[in-house]
Image: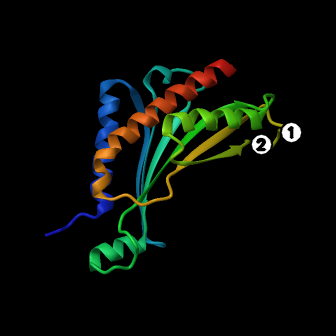
Amino acid sequence: MFHPLVFDNIRVVLEGAVYDRDFEGAILITGRSDVMDMATFHRLFQIEFKLAEAAEKEEAVTAQMQLRTGLADIAAEQLEQPLTDQIGCTICIHFHLPMNVKSEIPEEAKAITSMLNDIWGHRPYITHLLKARMEESRFEWPPERVDNQITLDFYRKIDEGNIDDLRDLIDHTIESLQQLQVYLDKQA
C-alpha cells in the first residue's frame, strides 16, 4: 500500500485550509503549483492569493505560501533511515508589494518589517528583495515602481506534528496581507 510522504500530508492540509478561506470569501486564490523536480529530486508546492476585497484593485498585495522538501528527506522517509536530523519539509511565505521608488525605500522596509514582526512575534526571518522591470526600449533609472518581495523564512522543518499550526499560519498570513494592503493604499 502507498504511504504518502510527510510533504504530501502537509500539502493536502495546507491546500485545503487555504481553499476554505477562499470559499469563505476572505481571499481569492490566484495561482497554484505542485512541482516534482526530477533533476534535483525535490518537491515544491506553492499557492498564491490576495485579499478578496483587493481583487479588483489595480495594485494589490499578493501572498505566496511555499512548501518544499528535498532528496534527503524523501529518501530518509522512504528508506526509514536517519539520513537527516529531522524528516520533514520547510515552509516560507512571500508577499509581493508594489512600491513607489520616490519614497524612502530603507525606511519603508524597516516599517514593513516592524509591522510583520508585530504580527508574527519576531519568529520568521524577514528579507526584502526589490525587483525593477526595465523594458527593452525604455531604460529609465531609477524606475518609478519596484516589486518588493518580502520573504518570511522560518528556517526549520515541519512535519505532521505541526499540522494543527497551519490554520494559525494561514490566519497570520491573511492578517499580514490586510496590514500590507492598508500600508500600500496609504502610500498611493
Q: Residues within 10 Å of mark 2 (few under 14, many from 20)?
A: few
Kindly identify the amino acid type of the residue bearing the numbered disc 2. Met
Q: Quadrant of residue 29?
A: top left
Q: Residue furthest left?
A: 1
Name which residue lies at 67% across and 38% down: 147
Name which residue lies at 35% across and 68% down: 87
SS for callout 1: loop
Answer whether residue 168 is visible to the viewer in this image.
Answer: yes
Name which residue lies at 27% across and 78% down: 80
Name which residue lies at 30% across and 39% down: 17
Q: Disc 2 designates what residue?
A: 134
Q: In the rendering, at what x and y percent does residue 82 appear?
A: 34, 79
Q: In the rendering, at what x and y percent does residue 78 appear?
A: 28, 75
Q: Disc 1 designates what residue?
A: 141
Callouts 2 and 1 close, C-beta under 8 Å: yes
Q: In the rendering, at what x and y percent does residue 88 appear?
A: 36, 64
- Asked if residue 67 is positioned above or below residue 70 in the image, the reply reads above
Q: Residues within 10 Å of mark 1 (few under 14, many from 20)?
A: few
Q: Quadrant of the C terminus?
A: top right
